[in-house]
Amino acid sequence: MTKVLSAVAWPYANGPRHIGHVAGFGVPSDVFSRYMRMAGHDVLMVSGTDEHGTPILIAADEAGVSAQELADRNHRLIAEDLCALGVSYDLYTRTTTPNHYAVVQELFLGVYENGYFVEQTTYGAISPSTGRTLPDRYIEGTCPICGYDGARGDQCDNCGNQLDAHDLINPRSRINGETPEFVETQHFFLDLPALAEALKVWLDEREASGTWRPNVIRFSQNILDEIRPRPMTRDIDWGIPVPLEGWRDNPTKRLYVWFDAVIGYLSASVEWARRTGEPERWRDWWNPPVGGTAGGAAGEGALSYYFMGKDNITFHAQIWPAELLAYAGKGSHGGSPRSLEELNLPTEVVSSEFLTMEGRKFSSSKRVVIYVRDMLARYQVDAFRYFVAAAGPENQDADFTWAEFVRRTNDELVAGWGNLVNRTANLIAKNFGEIPAAAELTEADTALLATVDEGFGVVGELIARHRQKQAITEAMRMVAEVNRYVSSSEPWKLKGEDQRDRLATVLHVAAQAVSDCNTMLSPFLPHSANEVDRVLGGAGDVQPMPRMEEVEDLDGGAGYPIITGDYTAARAWSRQPVVPGTPVSKPTPVFTKLDPSVVEEELARLAGGTAGGAG
RNA sequence: GGGGCGGUAGCUCAGCCGGUCAGAGCAGAGGACUCAUAAUCCUUGGGUCGUGGGUUCGAGCCCCACCCGCCCUACCA
């Protein structure tokens, strides 16, 4: 049994999440985590809501509430959505807890004491009225290159050139129109060049493992060439204070997101351990064994997998590991870790590509979007999960279209898998009312059982290697095999008393094969796996589900909702023999077939949204 | 500007290190069956694998150039 950390990207609290977000990190991380538990590993799956930063402040101002109130509201919404999606977090928490603050500040002090911060004076824009940093993208003005008046501080939308905000002619804040003030300000930069060599050693070792997706490892290696110090603090009042004299009480200096959200993986693990009553237990997933290698292969300690979209590769393949190395004192300045001890680097950065929507990029402002909440309100959660697993942005950008969603659901989920469950249960209910015992097996029977049994190895291996599209395709191939078996065995023709044994055998074998397919599909389709289990007379406990819980803060802060759950009872990843005599009654269909008209309805909804949101 | 991805049957896509690699699913056509949400099963696929060169005994698969899409690169999170 290996300790496996599933570290899932932290959704940003500026609003509800759309299906593109959860297609990239939510579903894939859950499929992987559920499978690893079934395969007998000790999985710790953590994530939470990322609540700090400028966009939250701006959204809060617009909504007329405080940043914390807005974050509270969105944290709850996002958690509800992820819970409804069935993502099996051991802990889904947030970044505004005292626990997170403490872990972040501890990490800061470790990095600071080891000498991996450099103080630099920068020249940046602030808002005169608030004193907050004005990120380049929030400044607009006339492009010095092409003269376009709507250029943003980071880039001109007209000529495409990248700009420096203080080169803009007649710059103004996009937030309130005021003229930004360019001031000198002092900040801490993470000395990434001092960590580059250690990062390279780690990446080379990871590359040699051959497990990372080619584009991810290549990208990670490439960005090492242009490595430079990155600011870890900024002028803002919404974030985690810098734990140093002269900084701690300065209301306008806060830690930057690169030194905040990513540390959540660690702080959430700590919070999880504290909540279990064994506060040091997080170390099983984070500290390398004595004499072992951080982030090493199986047998050398815990494994850690980070799930995110491709826009986050830099943070997880460079900045986060650099912070861990700096804390441990593994860079060119040397040093040693403090109380957290040496921490494991990522075993694998599992980055997905992007999902597009009917051929266009998701855009909340342009209303090219479907929110997780709306999707789950109108359609079966596992129909959506099936689409993501089978046609998601695993290797390359993928397009979500309603026509394809309906087709996948109707032709593959309903007609392929759902119908197999239904016809099998119907035949059993009608002829025996319970799962019959098998008599003598024919060659066809044993062949089918062998084929399906082999599926566990094939499908499992593919999931472990993060090839979920191929994995679910393979599982569905098993489904087709069973459909073929039922059709060619023609149990409905076995009517005579002398054929009773044969009928019982065929239906027993079919029930076993369906049960096996259900087990194999359950990481992808956890909700319906439980329903299918009930259809076959089981208890419906194939896949445990996460739950929302209102908890007290551990350190006296305000209470908040979390997602958690007990997943120890997940079915094992292997054939579980069906039990003859288990009652099976006439089934009700598990999956709902979609009327083709939903395509037009949803497209009309999109078009309407576009018109409404124009501007 | 730099880095990277994709362009394979009407549609969506598989094709690992070059030699049954010209494939799968859907759609279309024909047939079988009736247990099942008209579901299932069987049969049926001549697409110059974006274009032009090159390397090789042999190239979707390697190299070069080019043409189309697209992504990443930000004192965004």
Image (cartoon, coloured by chain):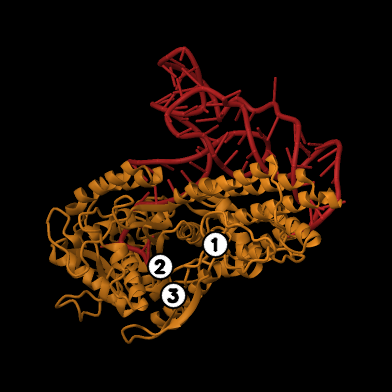
Nearest to viewer (mark 3 / mark 1): 1
- Residue A47: mark in rendering: 2
Viewer can see residue A176: no
Question: To which residue does mark 3 refer?
Answer: A59
The disc, 3 or 1, on the residue closer to the chain's N-terminal end is 1
The spot of residue A453 in percent (x, y) is 57, 48
Q: Which chain is orange?
A: A
Label 3 crowd bin: few (<14), some (14–19), many (20+), radius 10 Å: some
Relative placement, left or right, of A577 versus B65 is right
For numbered disc 1, what is the local secondary structure?
A: helix
Where does residue A97 sit, x and y in percent of width and height?
Answer: 34, 78
Q: Horizontal placement of A571 versus A259: left or right?
A: right
Give above or below for A192 relative to A200: below
Residue type for callout 1:
Ile
- Residue type at mark 3: give it: Ala
The location of residue A437, given as percent across then percent down, is 70, 56
Q: Quick one: quadrant of the N terminus of chain A?
A: bottom left
In the rendered structure, which disc, 2 or 1, sits on the residue that comes first in sequence?
Answer: 1
- Which of the two labelled residues, at mark 2 and mark 3, occupies the earlier sequence position? 2
Which residue is nearer to you in this view: A479 or A454? A454
Instruction: Kindly report which numbered mark, 2 or 3, lies closer to the viewer in this rendering.
Output: 2
Q: Mark 1 packing: few (<14 Cα in 10 Å), some, or many (20+)?
A: many
Q: Chain letter for red?
A: B
Quadrant in the picture for residue A70: bottom left
Label 1 near label 3: C-beta < 8 Å? Answer: no
Q: CA distance from mark 2 to mark 3?
A: 23 Å
Q: Check disc 1 and report the residue beneath it.
A: A19
Q: Amino acid at mark 2?
A: Ser
Q: Position of residue A494 (x, y in %)?
A: 83, 49
Task: State the quadrant of the C terminus of chain A.
Answer: bottom right
Foreground disc of the pair 2, 1: 2
